[in-house]
Amino acid sequence: MPESAASFSAVVSGLTDLTHDVRSLTLQLEDPGGIVFQPGQFVSFQIQRPSEKYATTRAYTIVSSPDAAGEIELLLNLVPGGPGSEYLFTLHPGDRTRFRGPFGTFVVTPGTTELLLVANDTGIAPFLSMLRWLVEHEPERTTTLVWALKGRNDLYYKEELERLSARMPNLTSVVLLAEPDPAWTGPIGVVQPVVEERIRSVANLTAFLCGSTSMIRDVRDLLRAKGPCQIYREPYYNDVQRATASGAQ
Ligand SMILES: Cc1cc2nc3c(=O)[nH]c(=O)nc-3n(C[C@H](O)[C@H](O)[C@H](O)COP(=O)(O)OP(=O)(O)OC[C@H]3O[C@@H](n4cnc5c(N)ncnc54)[C@H](O)[C@@H]3O)c2cc1C
């Protein structure tokens, strides 16, 4: 099994629609038949559209645990018109694909620091891999997960987070909805105030921030205001650039 980035061929072995625009895809590795990676790493796909001269490369985090080395699970958000997500949404069980990996330094390693995992939307992907690894190897590790989604129709992984919480006594998980319906009894809003309130001290903290650039910037700033700590960032898309380009303040 390759321990550094390599090229893989794989066959789609599972597909689950988690919401109207979020899908879980499982790839059974064929050649080579296994992958060694760390929880939080990603793989990349090259997409060649017939209308384009050059291929496009897109990154997708592995959400499965490194313990399941013969297959990988991906979490995909459909971005209309986007070459990467539209390609992966065309794949169905039995289809073959190729990717390269693993890549990235956004990884959790064994240790004693408290973990803060902050995500919006599919930014949860690396944290699923980390939690699936932690529950088997460091179930006592003090970990706070703060995850914001839009509405109740966008909610997924609820049962899995409950199962993980049941086996990880020091895991606190806060799932917020920005635009809930009246039946929602959980927390409402964005991640920033929750991080502000729950993280009193950063003295023994390792923070991982994944999702939009504005969320990552805000949470990084508020953590830095509390003192020095290790902060890892994995921006999936740039909403600051989009807001600036469209003239928004
Ligand atoms: C290290 C890394 C890991 C990633 N892992 C994942 C993953 O596990 N799952 C996943 O779904 N994506 C992930 N992404 C994002 C992914 O690589 C693509 O950028 C995304 O799928 C959009 O690509 P596209 O070609 O479909 O659309 P593009 O043409 O690249 O994007 C079109 C527009 O949509 C915006 N956009 C891109 N992604 C989103 C989003 N999630 N929500 C809202 N707007 C968006 C872009 O900023 C752009 O303006 C990751 C990105 C990085 C850098």
Image (cartoon, rainbow, N blue to C red):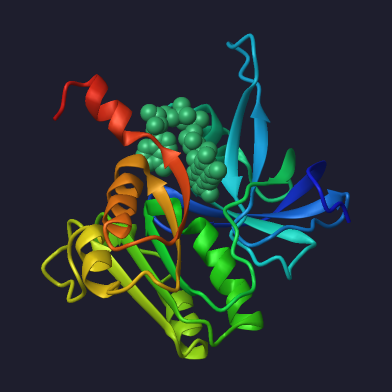
Q: Residue at the location (50% across, 86% down)?
A: 168
Query: From the viewer's perspective, is residue 163 above or below residue 78?
Result: below
Placement of the C terminus among the 4 image quadrants: top left
Query: From the viewer's perspective, is residue 86 above or below residue 211?
Result: above
Give residue 185's position: percent from left, percent from top.
17, 76
Placement of the N terminus among the 4 image quadrants: bottom right
Give residue 46's position: percent from left, percent from top.
67, 29
Q: Residue at the location (54% across, 87% down)?
A: 140
Answer left or right for 210 relative to 61. Answer: left
Give residue 248's position: percent from left, percent from top.
15, 27
Furthest residue toward left: 182
Between residues 20 and 106, which one lies in front from this camera angle?
A: 106
* Figure quadrant of residue 222: bottom left
Query: From the viewer's perspective, is residue 237 above or below residue 211?
Result: above
Between residues 221 and 92, which one lies in front from this camera angle?
A: 221
Between residues 75 and 196, which one lies in front from this camera angle?
A: 196
* Figure quadrant of residue 193: bottom left
Residue 77 visible at all: no
Between residues 32 and 109, which one lies in front from this camera angle?
A: 109
Give residue 149's position: percent from left, percent from top.
30, 57
Residue 193 visible at all: yes
Q: Residue at the location (57% across, 53% down)?
A: 106
